[in-house]
Image (tube, rainbow, N blue to C red):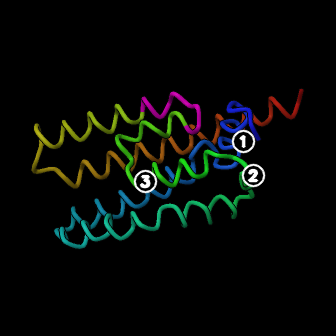
Amino acid sequence: MTDLNQQHAEFRLCHGGGAAYLAVGGVLWLGAASLGASGQIPAAMLTLLIGGMFIHPLASALSSLVGMPKPQSTNGLTTLVIWISLTIPLGLPFSYVYAMKSFLVLAGILVLTDVLFGFVFPASFATCGFVAGAFLLIFAVIHFLIVRQEKNRTSGS
């Protein structure tokens, strides 16, 4: 597979525009925020630390469970995603991998949320986790619907 546009389209289709990853991340953040809100701050931090290591395998399993295909072995974006997942600077590279500008919007929302709760409401760190988790789940649904619509449009023509 040599055409970069085809690689992006395949990656969107195979991963639902990152919906599975966003959903797993959202549930992780909501779980950690729940622990933090109940006063279990070390457990909340460990949930994010340890749970973060399992986002990729859990999201891959979720993708398979809902019947999403796997990308071809010749798709070079697979290797790129592995490297991105190790760094994740603001989530911006995901906008490139999936060729979806909505990741830029999500990154902006998450950065603004972090700044708001980090500097304006620092005592409400658990609330920040709930807000971040909610936005991740919202964007998971949005991305899933975008890719489903794209798939219907291309299979119908």
Q: Is residue 5 visible?
A: yes
- Say which mark, if any, is on residue 72: 2
Secondary-structure class at tag 2? loop
Task: Write the residue at 61% across / 51% down.
Answer: 78
Which badge, 1 or 2, comes first in the chain's sequence? 1
Q: CA distance from mark 1 to mark 2?
A: 8 Å
Q: Main secondary structure of the magenta part?
A: helix
- Where is residue 136? Give x, y as percent: 44, 46
Q: Left or right: where does residue 127 sit relative to residue 74?
A: left
The residue pinned by badge 3 equals 26
For disc 2, the neighbor class at 10 Å (few under 14, some 14 to 19, many from 20) is few
Task: Write the residue at 18% across / 68% down.
Answer: 41
Mark 3 vs 1: CB contact within 8 A: no
The nearer-to-camera label among 2 and 3 is: 2
Q: Left or right: where does residue 52 sit relative to residue 144?
A: left
Does residue 103 belong to the magenta stretch? yes
For disc 1, the neighbor class at 10 Å (few under 14, some 14 to 19, many from 20) is many
Secondary-structure class at tag 1? helix
The residue pinned by badge 1 equals 10
Q: CA distance from mark 3 to mark 1?
A: 24 Å
Amino acid type indicated by mark 3: Gly
